[in-house]
């Protein structure tokens, strides 16, 4: 049986086109491979040695760098004309370099008709047999993101996608899950690596992803601790999706939005007349989420009375609506989120019910510089195919536009600027700046440098700080010495860090994120210690 070798990059339009081709070639055995744009020449070199005379090859590659195409030209020259005639390149209509490369190598070329944005008005080309529908495209994108989060081998994920859609229609629960993913704005945990590098050189996001998959499958109640803007709700969604409840509801509630009985009503529902505006009975989120997952954001802001009622529900799954007497039951997994500084407001007994597992999101300032740049590139890529209305005309952010953005983000001065900024808004702040940079052309790097210049300057009187540290070093013979010198244990850490920074040349000579990592403390802890000393 002849084989169709499909080589795909990690993009939904490429997979959507591959599915269409696989559906047309009924009598062919399908063999699926992962094609990394940087490995095009090596992939073609291996193919030239293994391709059989009756095989066909589809290269589904949206775009790549021209320098990589020059390497691939030399490899293509070694292909016999008979085999070269069986190769087809499907690429973006906005990648003239790939079109020219196909012409130079005498390859068949197709424009990828699936690169249009995934929107309700999109229609598959009617003249093409076996087109991939819009809902199937949603599922493909969802399945790719799930593979990325779980660290799956891309080739195996591609094979499952193509095989499933080639053999039959998606099941209803699969479509529901894909639509839930799409409607949530396609949440993902940006900044991780692909399968290979993730295993050999994992970063903080990779480790969090691995733990999220493991915890998600366990079904345990989980509390996510992290600063604002670090993607706590996105992480909660993946915990739900990787569980056995993934095809059931995922509902979210911000506990800071409601107070007292209104929060209790949102959670557990109310009966008619339970309070002034309760004109009719209402189902609560606990009832709506039965069988699924309930995400409680800003959990410590929950009123003590509601915390007590939630604790009761977690113990045996029973609850009563506000103003009601009938006991009801629901089977709900509870995932909650809190900022570290607010955790003490939570009842200890409730914490232990909710925190079967505690996960910590990663602040941007705690990441390596290359990872911050990587996240910026990832966020920029999300904007690809976006239409932008300029004064002169409407343009599309083609791959070439996005690649130019990547080059600017990776320039040493700009990368250093991204790494040195403390990012109080974390991922949310970075995402906003990247959108402004790409869509408006704002000079975000100049803006970040101005913000950093306004950050509180280092203490000028280093001798005073040194004396503070020296007081801790002098010998102690009696408890009275401690009192006379004003030694307080709470000041010890700050005094040591200030003295250490002074020895390193002062605030201007250090990179705070790296020093915090070396000391094994958080950036917030380091910053608080470096504020000008104020005597008790």
Image (cartoon, helix red, strand yellow):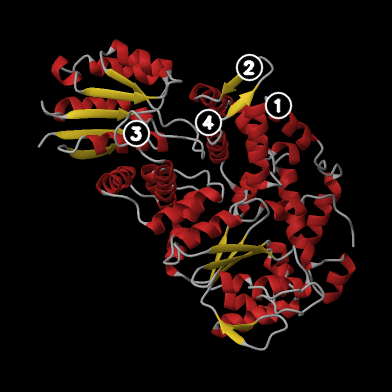
Q: Is residue 187 visible?
A: no
Establish if 330 lies above or below 212: below
Q: Earlier in the sequence, mark 3 or mark 1?
A: 3
Q: Nearer the viewer, mark 2 or mark 4?
A: 2
Q: Earlier in the sequence, mark 2 or mark 1?
A: 2
**Circle 1 residue:** 442
**Circle 4 residue:** 384
Residue drawn at (68%, 42%), measured in percent from left and top? 429
Secondary structure found at label 2: loop
Q: CA distance from mark 3 to mark 1?
A: 36 Å
> Within 10 angstroms of label 1, few (less than 14), some, or many (20 or more) residues?
some
Q: CA distance from mark 3 to mark 2?
A: 30 Å
Is 72 in front, or is 119? 119
Q: CA distance from mark 1 to mark 4?
A: 18 Å
**Coordinates of residue 51 in the picture (x, y in percent):** 15, 29
Confirm or deny contact between disc 2 and disc 4 (CB under 8 A).
no
**Viewport quadrant of the C terminus:** bottom right
**Circle 3 residue:** 17
**Circle 2 residue:** 393
Q: Nearer the viewer, mark 2 or mark 1?
A: 2
């Amino acid at each position: 049986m002849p084989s169709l070798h499909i080589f795909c990059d990690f993009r939904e339009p490429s997979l959507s086109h591959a599915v269409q081709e696989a559906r047309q070639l009924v009598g062919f055995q399908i063999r699926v491979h992962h094609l990394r744009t940087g490995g095009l020449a090596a992939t073609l070199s291996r193919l030239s040695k293994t391709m059989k005379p009756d095989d066909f090859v589809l290269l589904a590659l949206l775009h790549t760098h021209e320098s990589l195409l020059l390497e691939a030209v030399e490899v293509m020259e070694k292909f016999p004309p008979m085999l070269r005639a069986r190769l087809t390149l499907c690429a973006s209509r906005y990648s003239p370099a790939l079109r020219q490369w196909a012409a130079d190598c005498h390859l068949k070329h197709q424009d990828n008709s699936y690169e249009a944005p995934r929107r309700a008005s999109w229609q598959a080309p009617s003249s093409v047999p076996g087109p991939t529908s819009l809902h199937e495209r949603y599922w493909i994108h969802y399945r790719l993101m799930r593979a990325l989060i779980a660290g799956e081998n891309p080739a195996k994920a591609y094979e499952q996608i193509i095989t499933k859609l080639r053999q039959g229609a998606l099941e209803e629960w699969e479509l529901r899950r894909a639509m839930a993913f799409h409607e949530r704005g396609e949440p993902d945990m940006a900044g991780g690596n692909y399968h290979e590098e993730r295993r050999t050189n994992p970063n903080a996001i990779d480790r969090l992803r691995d733990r999220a998959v493991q915890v998600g499958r366990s079904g345990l109640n989980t509390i996510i601790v992290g600063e604002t803007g670090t993607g706590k709700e996105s992480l909660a969604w993946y915990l739900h999706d990787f569980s056995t409840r993934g095809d059931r509801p995922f509902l979210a509630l911000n506990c800071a939005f409601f107070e007292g009985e209104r929060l209790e009503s949102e959670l557990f529902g109310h009966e008619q007349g339970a309070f002034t505006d309760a004109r009719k009975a209402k189902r609560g989120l606990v009832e709506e989420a039965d069988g699924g997952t309930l995400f409680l954001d800003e959990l410590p802001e929950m009123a003590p009375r509601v915390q007590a009622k939630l604790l009761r529900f977690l113990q045996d799954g029973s609850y009563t609506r506000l103003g009601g007497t009938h006991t009801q039951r629901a089977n709900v997994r509870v995932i909650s989120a809190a900022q570290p500084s607010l955790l003490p407001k939570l009842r200890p007994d409730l914490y232990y019910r909710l925190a079967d597992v505690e996960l910590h999101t990663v602040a941007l300032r705690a990441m390596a510089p290359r990872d911050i740049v990587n996240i910026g590139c990832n966020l920029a890529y999300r904007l690809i195919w976006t239409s932008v209305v300029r004064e002169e005309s409407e343009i599309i952010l083609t791959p070439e536009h996005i690649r130019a953005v990547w080059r600017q983000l990776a320039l040493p001065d700009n990368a250093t600027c991204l790494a040195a900024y403390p990012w109080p808004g974390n991922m949310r702040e970075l995402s906003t700046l990247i959108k402004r940079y790409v869509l408006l052309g704002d000079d975000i790097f100049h803006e970040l440098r101005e913000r950093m210049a306004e950050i509180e300057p280092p203490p000028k009187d280093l001798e005073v700080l040194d004396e503070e540290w020296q007081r801790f070093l002098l010998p102690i013979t009696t408890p009275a010495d401690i009192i006379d010198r004003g030694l307080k244990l709470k000041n010890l850490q700050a005094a040591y860090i200030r003295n250490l920074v002074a020895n390193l040349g002062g605030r201007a000579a250090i990179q705070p994120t790296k020093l915090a990592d070396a000391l094994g403390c958080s950036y917030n802890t380091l910053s608080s210690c470096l504020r000008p000393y104020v005597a008790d």
